[in-house]
Structure formats: C-alpha cells, structure tokens
Image (cartoon, grey):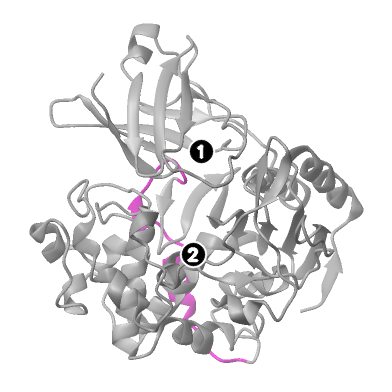
Amino acid sequence: MLIEPLPPELARPIEAEMRRLQVPGASVGVLFDGRAFTASFGVTNVAHALPVTDTTLFQIGSTSKTFTATALMQLVEQGGVDLDATVRTYLPDFRLASEQDAARLTVKHLVTHHGGFEGDDARRERDDRGDDALARFVSGMAERPQLTPAGYTFSYSNAGLYVLGRIIEVVTGQPFERVIRKRIFEPLAMHDSTYFPEYALTHRVAAGHVVTADGPVVARPWHVPRAIAPGGGIISNVAEQLAYADFHLGDGAAPNGERILAPATIAFMQHPQATAGSMCDSIGVTWMLSEIGAAHFVFHGGATNGHLSSFELVPSRGFAVTALTNSDTGRGLRPFVSELMRQYFLGIAPSNPPASPIELAQLDEYAGRYQQTNAHLQVTTDGSGLVIHESSPALRATEPLPVAPVHAVPGDADRFAILAGDRRGETVEFLRDAAGRIEWMRWDGRISRRMPR
C-alpha cells in the first residue's frame, strides 16, 4: 500500500487540538478512493520522548473485538461455529450466576453485547500470563452479577468477548493469539501487530498517559492482563490499521490473494444484528453501526491504559479513518479527527439531531443517581435537558483531571442526545420496568442501575 502524507490543511488543526487537549502523541490514517494518507504527531512518552512515526505501536483497545469477530466468522464459514448455538455447545461447563441464562446464552448474544451479565469489573481480570489465561478467566464467569436476562438489551460487555475468545480456542485447539496471528495478522502483512508487550518492546512504542493538573503523566503499568486479549489486547500501528481497514472495505481477500472471508460474510458483519444505543444505533457482528449524513458508518474504538483510539469505515464510499492516541484526553481528539475527515473527504458536515420540547416536570422524572461498575452518575436538569455528572468509584494511582458535566437534550421518547464535548454524537437512553418506572440508564454503552433516592 502506497502511503501519502496527510494534507497540511488537515494536519495543522489536528496538531492544534492535540495541544489544547494535552495529547502527547497521535497517529492518524485515512483511506479514500483507493489512496492512503497518514500523519503522526508528538512524542511517544513525556518521560522518555521519541517522535511518533507511522510505525509507532499503540494499544488499540476495543477495536481488537472486531479481529476476534473476524476470526469467529471464519469458523462460522467453515461450519465450526453457529452464531445461534448456545455457548454451552462449545463450552459445556460454562456457568453464569443465573443457571437459566447460562443455558440459553448464545454466541450471537455475545457478539451483539446482549449477554446481560456484568462485563467490566477489572478486579476480576486476573493478570495470568500463561496459555490458560482465557480458560481461567471464563471459569470465573459465575462470579459476575447477572444484571438482565440474556438477550434482553444491549449493554456493552468486555467479558462477553473474552468468552468468545475462549470459544475460538476450544474450536481451533490453539491459543487465541496464535489463531489471530495465523488467520489475520500474517495474511494482511501486519507483521508488527501483536498482543504481547515483550514483542512490542522491540519496536518504537507509545506509552499511555493520564492528563493531570500538572500535565500528562505516564500511565503504569503499560501492559494489560492476557485474558483481555479478545476484547482489547492488540498493539498495532497506523499503517497496519489501514491494512486492516482496507480488508474490511474489500472483498474479503488478503493482498496476496488468500481468502480470509467471503464478501457476503464481510457484509453480514456490517449489517445490523440487534438494536443498540448510547454508542451507536445498532450493532453488527461486534461492529458499531450508525447512519450519519445519509451514509452507513461501521466503526469501533478503544480505551486502555491511557491509550484512546478510533476506527471507522464507510464501505459505500471506500472510506476509512483511524486515530491512535496515547492519552486519556484522546477521547476528545477522536471525534475531532473523525468529523474533520468526514467533512474533507465525504462532504459530511457535523449536524445535530432535532431536539424535542419537553416539560420540566417530565425532565425531573429522569433525575437521580445511577450506578454501573466503572461509573457513578448523578443526573440533574437545567430546564433544557439533562446534566450528567460522572465520577469513578475506582482508586487510581494518578489522579486525572475532573470529568466535565455532560449536557444532553431530549430527542425521542426516553432518549437524549449529546451535542457537544468529548462525547458528542453519543446518546443517553432510559429503560423502564414492566410497571413503566425508569429502571436503567444506558451510558457509555452500559446499562446503569437507578439507585434509591
């Protein structure tokens, strides 16, 4: 793939936004109309600075889920996995806190984030490094609370992808990372991409950062537990992310002609499989899907250890953009880069959904406290919408900058849109129980239980 420099009129505003957000380093890549563009900015590490280049490795976080899904769909094509089969078809000893849900949970529930179990408690992610790391993790799934019945609603779940990774191991008889290397990395010539820090450290590597009142501080430790590999473990660079994007924009073949997936399977992965919310309109086979400016967007992103990334495709236009950053404030750089590239290459300007008028008394119904594993949320009203204050219950060695309140305006029934800030483009939904009372708030893709007043 011949790579050209990103036009200066695009690079300059990215650099300015990085300075505003105090992002130490970033790499940005674009595919459009058969051409590839990249630009890299800043430094790898504020403590031991090297310039970021197109081959600098970043943790890409949850975009890794789409690699897991790609390997899974190869097994579906080969008859080794059935999306509608129960998880116990492949993992007979699989257990959840709810026996009924463990028995009915399907593979499709996992790829569409409809498992219903708590999926983000990092305290349960043991730092095992052996080949049995996934097996050991999945053996502890019964310790996780079952929040809703399996299949009930979309709630983003990292743990669900770890279970998928274990299914891939059992069906293939190989460690998960070896499957991805042989079936995806090697055919796509992604030779630097890896799951293992001991391999990454032979290359130029970006360190994650947390921005504090005193500026960016390196996030430690650098590595993540091996068991999270299927959900967020890939270490890669912008050039190899473009190779992966080109594959998912194409006909399912690698550059050497090797068939990885059938074209119909690529399309199936990018087609809505279930309704979603907060992060996206619907969910495909791990891909997030939304309609923006009359275009069908297929996307994902990632956050881990002070690395924030984004990855999006518009298959009908042959367009892709990815941004890799090494700071928690990269959350704000991601939508900035996406909107800039959409407007420049596709002519899609940022737009906001229409707001629906709502009475203050109606707004008050949504006010209150909501809680999920990684966030405590206080919802208040300001007369025009909701104000959401987020705090983290987790204790961190490095104290990040306070999270600014988020304003959300009313849209459809029980749905609010975020129009500004780092979360612009996301929505907030409220789910009701059988009696019509608000029971859950969906925030950052996860359902958050309403707490007593």
Image position of 234 (left or right of 136): right
Please tell me whether mark 2 sits on a helix, a strand or a loop: helix
| Residue bounds of the magenta highlight | 257-280
- Residue lying farthest front? 397
Residue type at mark 1: give it: Glu
Identify the residue at image location x=70%, y=81%. Answer: 202
Please tell me whether mark 1 sits on a helix, a strand or a loop: loop
Which badge, 2 or 1, comes first in the chain's sequence? Answer: 2
Residue 79 can be seen in this image: no
Instruction: Decide whether residue 295 is among the magenta residues.
Output: no
Image position of 438 (left or right of 250): left
Identify the residue at image location x=39%, y=59%. Answer: 158
Q: Please identify the quadrant where the C terminus is shown.
A: top left
Q: Please identify the quadrant where the N terminus is shown.
A: bottom right
Residue type at mark 2: give it: Gly
Q: Which residue is mark 2?
A: 232
Question: What secondary structure characterizes most of the magenta part?
Answer: loop
